[in-house]
Image: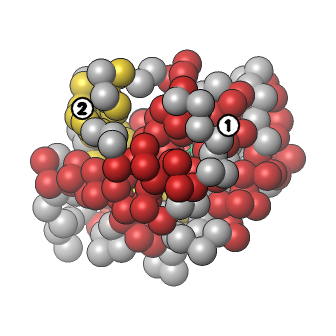
């Protein structure tokens, strides 16, 4: 069986499950663009906070959304996002303030609509490995290459702590899984990989073996 053209690999999972590491490496092996869709929600959250808007003030967030231009592109095989004149960098996007507010912003349907449209555009141009919460369920439901990377809550908390990042993982998981708009779910045809007791190499190998077995 031959894969779809272009190749679309959807990798979902809860916070700190290790999906970024795996998605980056799978993208490099396949020569696809790596896109962290969470980075797009983080970028807009940073912009909201930068403007002095409280994340829960939905009307003001929507006004800002309407006035905001997103430019999504690619550099060295990695998706980039520019808002207005600002090319977002990981230090802005991974701040404690962004961690604390991103799930509230990401639960707003209009925000998701705008960013999902940008996410789909990536696959018009290139093969893509995209990671997030709703990539297999909503953004690219038609791709046969769906993965759900999980790990126990203890392992995930420990991973974030060891990165020295303050992050309310349990709270984000709760909001992400219970929101009305595109909640975090396991797509029904996804391969679930529990990474709690696996090395990154082992997870990458499991995902790659599943992809290779379906590509001639
Ligand atoms: O840092 P971590 O991998 O846990 O999360 P992330 O992928 O950077 O995503 C940050 C937040 O963005 C998540 O907690 C979700 O609230 C939101 N998100 C989403 O709603 N949908 C996506 N496809 C990706 C992220």
**Image point 72% across, 39% down: which residue?**
100
Q: Is residue 37 left or right of residue 191?
A: left
Q: Quarter of the image containing the C terminus?
A: bottom left
> Pointer 1: what residue?
99
Q: Position of residue 186 (x, y in %)?
A: 58, 72
> For the view shown, which residue lies furthest in the right direction?
154
Q: Is residue 104 left or right of residue 188?
A: right
- Tell me, yes or no, if residue 159 can be seen here: no
**Image point 20% across, 73% down: which residue?**
1
Q: How many labels, in total?
A: 2
Q: Position of residue 17 (x, y in %)?
A: 66, 47
Mark linked to residue 61: none
- Tell me, yes or no, if residue 167 can be seen here: yes
> Pointer 2: what residue?
74
Q: Count neighbours of disc 2 (C-alpha within 10 A) and say few if under 14, some if 14 to 19, many if 20 or more.
A: some
Placement of 51 over or under 171, stated as above or below: above
- In the rendered image, which quarter is residue 27 located in? top left
Cα separation between marks 2 and 1: 24 Å
Placement of 184 over or under 203, stated as above or below: below
> For the view shown, which residue lies furthest in the bottom direction?
188
Pick the front one: 178 or 155: 178
- In the rendered image, which quarter is residue 5 located in? bottom left
The verdict on label 1 being within 8 Å of ligand 1 is: yes
Q: Is residue 162 left or right of residue 1?
A: right
Q: In the image, which is nearer the foreground, mark 2 or mark 1?
A: 1
Q: Position of residue 45 (x, y in %)?
A: 54, 39
Colour mapping: secondary structure
Element on which disc 1 rests: helix
């Amino acid at each position: 069986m031959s894969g779809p053209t272009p190749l679309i690999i959807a990798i979902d999972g809860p916070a700190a499950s290790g999906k970024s590491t795996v998605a980056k490496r799978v993208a490099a092996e396949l020569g696809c663009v790596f896109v962290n869709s969470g980075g797009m929600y983080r970028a807009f959250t940073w912009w909201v906070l930068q403007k002095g808007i409280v994340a829960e003030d939905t009307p003001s967030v929507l006004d800002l959304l309407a006035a905001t231009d997103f430019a999504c592109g690619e550099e060295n095989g990695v998706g980039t996002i520019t808002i207005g004149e600002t090319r977002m960098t990981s230090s802005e996007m991974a701040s404690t303030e962004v961690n604390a507010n991103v799930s509230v912003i990401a639960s707003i349907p209009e925000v998701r609509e705008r960013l999902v449209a940008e996410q789909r555009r990536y696959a018009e141009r290139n093969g893509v490995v995209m990671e997030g919460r709703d990539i297999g369920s909503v953004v690219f439901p038609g791709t046969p290459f769906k993965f759900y990377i999980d790990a126990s809550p203890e392992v995930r908390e420990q991973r974030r702590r060891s990165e020295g990042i303050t992050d309310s993982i349990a709270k984000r998981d709760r909001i992400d899984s219970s929101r009305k708009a595109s909640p975090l779910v396991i797509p029904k045809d996804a391969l679930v990989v529990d990474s709690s007791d696996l090395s990154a190499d082992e997870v990458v190998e499991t995902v790659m073996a599943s992809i290779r077995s379906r590509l001639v």
